[in-house]
């Protein structure tokens, strides 16, 4: 399973990229807005730091505007994936950009039917928002399971990119289902690193090493 970071925060992107954990990045207008400043600079920097796919989203709602913005966004780098919303115009733009060789991530997917249509339109990724479904009392992970089954039945090449992830258990569930990608807010990735027994174990190892050193000043690694 590939791990993308769902953020426009450069510090977090650098931090986790330096650990070799990131296969890509997803952004959206809300994430860019949260960081403030010039979004152009942020998009430029992100596409330089990350070698893998970087999803940058259009803000036009009609076909021609999406195409124009898609072409502009693609100039930030060959690794740019244009994110289009799950609308009729978004699917038309998905088809046209894909035909031009520009990969597309269809976002704001909330049903299997929407995922199938996006796959038919040639999307490289579909982004089902599981957390937002959970928020309204639906089961987001069931949607991932259903899309996975359908894509398998028909050998769709489109990758399932699990979005709107809220906690580490979502990641485990997505991996068990065999989702292609999870895109994680930095705090969720941070939580995945941690286990209290790791901290206790390390503390004890270091205390025991200190004991050994106290018996002989020449002890070293
Ligand atoms: O990348 C879009 C998606 O992950 C949004 O998540 O937390 O705003 O529902 P959220």
Image (spheres, rainbow, N blue to C red):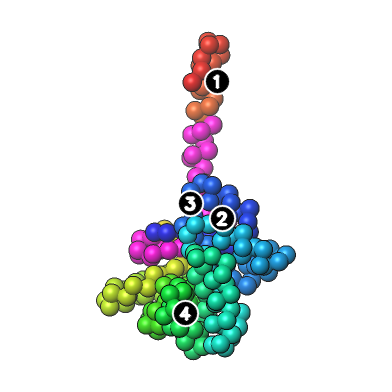
Does the CB distance between marks 3 and 1 fall below 8 Å?
Answer: no
CA gap, disc 2 and disc 4: 24 Å
Whichever of labels 3 and 4 marks the residue nearer the N terminus, that label is 3
Precedes in sequence: disc 1 or disc 2: 2
Question: Which label is found at residue 48?
Answer: none
Q: Nearer the viewer, residue 128 or 202?
A: 128
* Sequence-wise first label, 3 or 1: 3
Residue at the limit of the structure toward the right, as seen here: 37
Question: Does label 2 or label 4 sit earlier along the sequence?
Answer: 2
Q: Nearer the viewer, residue 82 or 141?
A: 82
Mark closest to the chain's N terminus, 2 or 3: 3
Check disc 2 and report the residue beneath it.
49
Q: Is residue 25 something one can see in this rendering?
A: yes
Residue stretch in magenta: 174-203
Q: Residues within 10 Å of mark 2 (few under 14, many from 20)?
A: few
Is residue 184 highlighted in magenta?
yes
The crowding category of the residue bearing disc 4, from other C-alpha atoms within 10 Å (few below 14, some 14 to 19, many at least 20), is many
Residue 195 horizontal/vertical position (percent): 50, 45
Cα–Cα span, label 3 and label 1: 33 Å
- Asked if the residue at tag 3 contacts the one at tag 2, i.e. Cβ–Cβ closer than 8 Å, the answer is no
Q: Position of residue 166 (x, y in %)?
A: 53, 63
Q: Secondary structure at mark 1?
A: helix
Q: Nearer the viewer, mark 1 or mark 2?
A: 2
Residue 44 is situated, as x and y percent measured from the top left of the image, at: 61, 63
Residue displayed at 52% across by 74% down: 83
Q: Which residue is mark 1?
A: 210
Tell me if I can see residue 133 in this picture: no
Image-based side of 7 in relation to 147, left or right: right
Q: Which mark is residue 97?
A: 4
- For label 4, the SS is helix
Would you name the residue on which mark 3 appears?
Answer: 21
């Amino acid at each position: 399973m590939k791990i993308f970071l769902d953020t426009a925060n450069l510090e977090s992107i650098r931090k986790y990229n330096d650990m070799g954990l990131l296969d890509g990045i997803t952004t959206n207008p809300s994430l860019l807005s949260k960081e403030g400043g010039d979004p152009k600079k942020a998009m430029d920097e992100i596409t330089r730091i990350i070698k893998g796919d970087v999803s940058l989203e259009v803000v036009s709602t009609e076909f021609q505007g999406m195409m124009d913005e898609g072409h502009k966004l693609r100039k930030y780098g060959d690794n740019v994936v244009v994110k289009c919303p799950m609308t009729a115009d978004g699917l038309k733009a998905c088809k046209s950009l894909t035909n031009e060789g520009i990969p597309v991530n269809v976002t704001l997917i909330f049903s299997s039917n929407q995922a199938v249509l996006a796959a038919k339109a040639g999307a490289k990724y579909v982004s089902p928002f599981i957390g937002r479904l959970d928020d309204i009392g639906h089961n987001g992970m069931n949607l991932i399971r259903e899309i996975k089954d359908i894509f398998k039945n028909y050998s769709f090449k489109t990758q399932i990119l699990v979005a709107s992830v809220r906690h580490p258990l979502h990641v485990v569930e997505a991996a068990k289902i065999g989702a292609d990608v999870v895109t994680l807010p930095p705090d969720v990735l941070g939580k995945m690193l941690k286990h209290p027994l790791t901290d206790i174990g390390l503390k004890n190892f270091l205390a025991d090493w200190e004991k050994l050193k106290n018996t002989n000043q020449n002890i070293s690694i």
